[in-house]
Image (cartoon, rainbow, N blue to C red):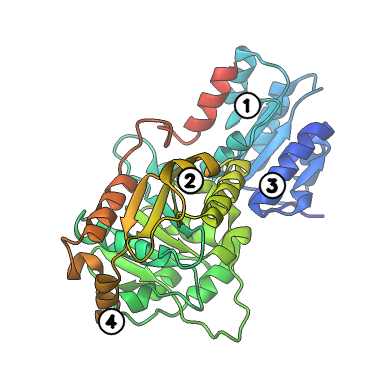
Amino acid sequence: MSMHTDFMAFVNDEGTATSIRTWAERQGFPVDTVRMGGADLFSTLLESDPPPKIAIVDLDNQDQPIQIAARLVSLCGPASHIIAIGSANDVHLYRSMLAAGLADYLVKPLTPELLTQTMISATRDPKTDGPGASKEAKTIVVVGVRGGTGASTIATNIAWLIAHEMKKKCVLLDLDLQFGTSALALDLEPGHGLRDIVSSPQRVDGLMISSALVPESDHLAVLSAEESIEDIVHVDTNAIAALLKEMRTPYQAIVIDLPRHLIPSQKRLLATAHEIVLVTEMSLVGIRDTLRLRTMLKGLGSTARITQVASRLGPTHPAAVGEAAFAKGAQAKIDLQLPDDPKNVSAANNAGKTLGELAPNAALTKGLRELASRLLTQDQGSGEKKTSGLFGLLFSGSKEKA
């Protein structure tokens, strides 16, 4: 059986295989991307198959691990990133592995966070790293914990604020290809071609993306669709990864409106996002589903900064539970509360305008402006981690162990 083009793992023990396989399945990779056999099996398959973009190779029980590592690097070429794993916690071995051309050496047992950062690093463009290089766009995913929380309204409005008030080049990606509202909210005709892009990773390229983008202004573009409700629309996780990779350099922010029904198929997107906004209601079911989502994100090894937003709070929609009770039950505090403003929201929707245009001084608009600013601000606490170089995050994890 041939190797997967994006990711493979070759391990020597069942415990490690189980850990990586569990993580890989959550990311949407097939079960057979994790195989028993270590470096020997990988070397054999390379004789007939092209190498994957990233490979994890177990070098335990090898007499000459450095020489084997160098040989694998030579066989795979510069387009592949090889991560060695082993039980030896030795800084000299670690340095020798890097000198041989490996991307990193990780000490068992592996954690979901390290595995996720491996995939993030493998899909980064080295040209976007280092002094003087163009900065990679920040990926912001907005998800409604419950239906009717206004997540799509929030996604559209923060994208507009980022583009028009913060003057950042931004693209708004609406992944609800049948019932999405982004284009309608901005008084735009949905573009053509998004369905083809998200269904086939092999067809994703800059020209196809450009033809599908609908410009709203010089700083904001929209990727959306209005597909037939009679069709089954497939959104491929590899296609989304390829799409985001193409848009990382031209844009400074990518705001993604992710409908809840796509959560199971878009775990890699959630795992690799920079920012995740969970929009909830202040209720018992809001507590339950917030906890479920956050637990899933932790299992994916996501290192995204999560911002918890409670929306539509007001006299007609009072909170069913208090803020302290919510924080205790969901194991996460509310970061921002957005007031209910049906009058301005309805007026904006009917006019095809955003709240920033129609009601720039409204309390809801001020809350959305605060949210947009927060999402583009580097977290100095426990959220985003600073990196240096292509595999900075992974190196920091390995050096600490070594």
Task: Please give the name of the residue rendered at 43% of the width and 69% of the height, measured from the top-left corner.
Answer: 209
The first of marks 3 and 1 along the sequence is 3
Kind of residue at badge 1 = Tyr
Per the image, label 1 sits on a secondary structure element best described as: strand
* Distance between mark 2 and mark 4 Cα atoms: 34 Å
The first of marks 3 and 2 along the sequence is 3
Q: Which residue is mark 1?
A: 105
Kind of residue at badge 3 = Ala
Q: Which residue is mark 4?
A: 350
Q: Which residue is mark 2?
A: 326
Q: Which residue is mark 3?
A: 24
Per the image, label 3 sits on a secondary structure element best described as: helix
User: Does residue 66 lie above or below 360 as drawn?
Assistant: above
Answer left or right for 221 relative to 38: left
Q: Are marks 3 and 1 in contact (CB under 8 Å)?
A: no
* Distance between mark 3 and mark 1 Cα atoms: 19 Å
